[in-house]
Amino acid sequence: MIKLTGDWAFDLFIGLMLYSLIFMAGWLTNHIPLLAQIKRTLEHLFKHELSVWLHRLNLLAVVLVFIHVQLISYITSIHPYMWLFNGYSLLTLVLYVGNKIRLATTFPTAS
């Protein structure tokens, strides 16, 4: 499971990085004509909904990294590190969920 979660997280992050470099880094596609051509070709296939799902895949990759670290016994034996890792992970989760709740209750959604 250690290798599997690490490999999946790594592959997801690499794929999301490549997608982001092509579709979200305008300065890069402005300077590299081949990337601009790839972007124009794929824009017809990739709709906004796909971008939303790719952001969700980013969250999945972060969860896989968290599980990956929890499974490595020689890392979990370093208790101060694990307290820090789990504490920051919990803080990040609470802030993320809190922000999502705040946005959902504060701003109206489009219909």
Image (spheres, rainbow, N blue to C red):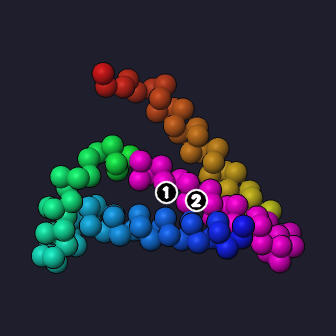
Residue under the image location 67 percent in, 61 percent down: 66
Q: Main secondary structure of the magenta part?
A: helix
Instruction: Give the residue pinned by disc 2.
Output: 62
Q: Where in the figure is residue 32, as x and y percent of width and height?
A: 16, 78
Rendered residue at 34%/48% (across/down)? 50
Q: In what element is the residue under mark 1?
A: helix
Q: Which residue is mark 1?
A: 58
Between residue 1 and residue 79, name the one nearer to us.
Answer: 1
Residue 84 seen in this snapshot: no
Task: Left or right? Give the position of 65 relative to 19.
Answer: right
Amino acid type for the residue under numbered disc 2 = Val
The residue located at (15%, 76%) in the rendering is 34
Q: Check the picture and name the quadrant holding the C terminus.
A: top left
Q: Is residue 53 left or right of residue 69?
A: left
Is the C-beta separation of discs 2 and 1 under 8 Å? yes
State the count of labels.
2
On the question of residue 16 being in view, the answer is: yes
The picture places residue 24, in percent across and down from the top left corner, at 28, 61
The disc labelled 1 sits on which kind of residue?
Answer: Asn
Secondary structure of residue under mark 2: helix
Range of residues picked out in magenta: 53-82
Question: To which quarter of the image does residue 37 belong?
Answer: bottom left
Residue at the (67%, 51%) spot, across then down: 91
> In terms of image quadrants, where is residue 72?
bottom right
Q: Is residue 55 magenta?
A: yes
Give how far apart the Cα atoms at labels 2 and 1 are.
6 Å
